[in-house]
Structures are given as structure tokens and as C-alpha cells.
């Protein structure tokens, strides 16, 4: 399992605490330092079953500057959103946990983190 975190984020710290308490085997990716490229963002979106606008933090300063709230949310605009997420990683919702079963979750709640743990446990990891 991998978790994309911003260490300054309380939700990320909470997710890591749960993973540690449960003795989970995971890798931390500080995605502001180790920025995912467009292909990685596309892959995680596929695992999440979401669109890029679903994981965009639209209230961040970068989002305001780019005007993303006014961007279309359709197939034609999808690449534009992904490009923006890769260029401005602060816009990526966090934490994102990639479970060992090939899925992923946005771990904003303790329940979502535990869901990802359960998905990994079902794989025997």
C-alpha cells in the first residue's frame, strides 16, 4: 500500500497514525516533494474510479489563480485538469491510499483509511 501525504495536513497525519496502529505495511509518498506525473495521476484516478475534478482542491490559492472552478467538467477538459494537478500538486486531495487490491481511496475519514486497509488485508498483505 502507498499513501500520498502532505505532512502538514491533519487528515494525512491521522491516516498515518491509523496505519501505524494497525501495523500496516505501507510506503509514504510526500507528493509535494515527489510529484506524481500525469500518467501516475491518470492511473490513480482509474484506481479511485473518479475524475480529476473530483480530487481537486478548488479552494487552494493555485486553484483560484487558475480559475479551475469555472473549468468544464467533461471528457474534453479531462486532460487540462490532469495537467493542472501535475503542475500544481497542492491541488490534489489528500491523503490518497492505493490499496493492494488495485483500488484506491481518498482517506479523508478514518473509515476510508480502514476501508483501504481491509482491501489490502483481503489480498493477504
Image: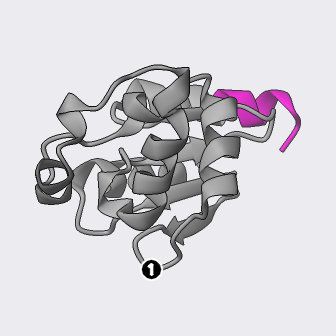
Q: Residue at x 11, y 57 (%)?
A: 61
Q: Is residue 1 left or right of residue 34?
A: right
Q: Secondary structure at mark 1?
A: loop
Position in image of residue 21 (x %, y %): 49, 51
Q: Residue at x 60, y 35 (%)?
A: 45
User: Total of numbered circles in the picture?
Assistant: 1
Position in image of residue 72 (x %, y %): 34, 25
Q: Is residue 106 left or right of residue 64?
A: right
Mark 1 burial class by Cα count in 10 Å: few <14, some 14-19, many 20+: few
Return the residue nearer the eye: 75 or 38: 75
Say above or below: 93 vs 88.
Answer: above
Position in image of residue 91 (x %, y %): 31, 52
Report the residue that reaches farthest toward the bottom.
33
Report the residue that reaches farthest toward the front.
76
Q: Residue at x 35, y 63 (%)?
A: 88
Q: Quadrant of the C terminus?
A: top right
Q: Quadrant of residue 104?
A: top right
Residue range (magenta): 118-125
Position in image of residue 33 (x %, y %): 44, 80
Q: Which residue is mark 1?
A: 33
Report the residue that reaches farthest toward the right.
124
Magenta: main secondary structure: helix
Return the residue nearer the eye: 45 or 7: 45
Q: Is residue 11 left or right of residue 42?
A: left
Q: Residue at x 38, y 62 (%)?
A: 89
Amino acid at each position: 500500500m502507498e499513501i500520498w501525504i502532505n505532512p502538514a495536513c491533519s487528515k494525512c497525519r491521522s491516516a498515518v497514525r491509523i496505519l501505524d496502529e494497525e501495523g500496516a505495511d505501507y510506503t509514504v509518498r510526500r507528493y509535494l516533494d515527489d510529484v506524481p506525473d500525469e500518467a501516475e495521476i491518470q492511473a490513480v484516478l482509474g484506481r479511485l474510479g473518479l475524475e480529476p475534478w473530483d480530487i481537486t482542491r478548488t479552494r487552494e490559492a493555485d486553484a483560484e489563480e487558475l480559475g479551475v472552478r469555472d473549468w468544464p467538467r467533461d471528457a474534453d477538459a479531462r486532460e487540462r485538469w490532469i495537467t493542472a494537478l501535475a503542475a500544481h500538486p497542492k491541488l490534489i486531495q489528500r491523503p490518497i491510499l492505493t490499496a493492494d487490491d488495485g483500488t484506491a481511496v481518498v482517506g479523508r475519514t478514518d473509515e476510508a483509511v480502514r476501508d483501504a486497509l481491509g482491501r489490502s488485508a483481503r489480498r493477504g498483505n
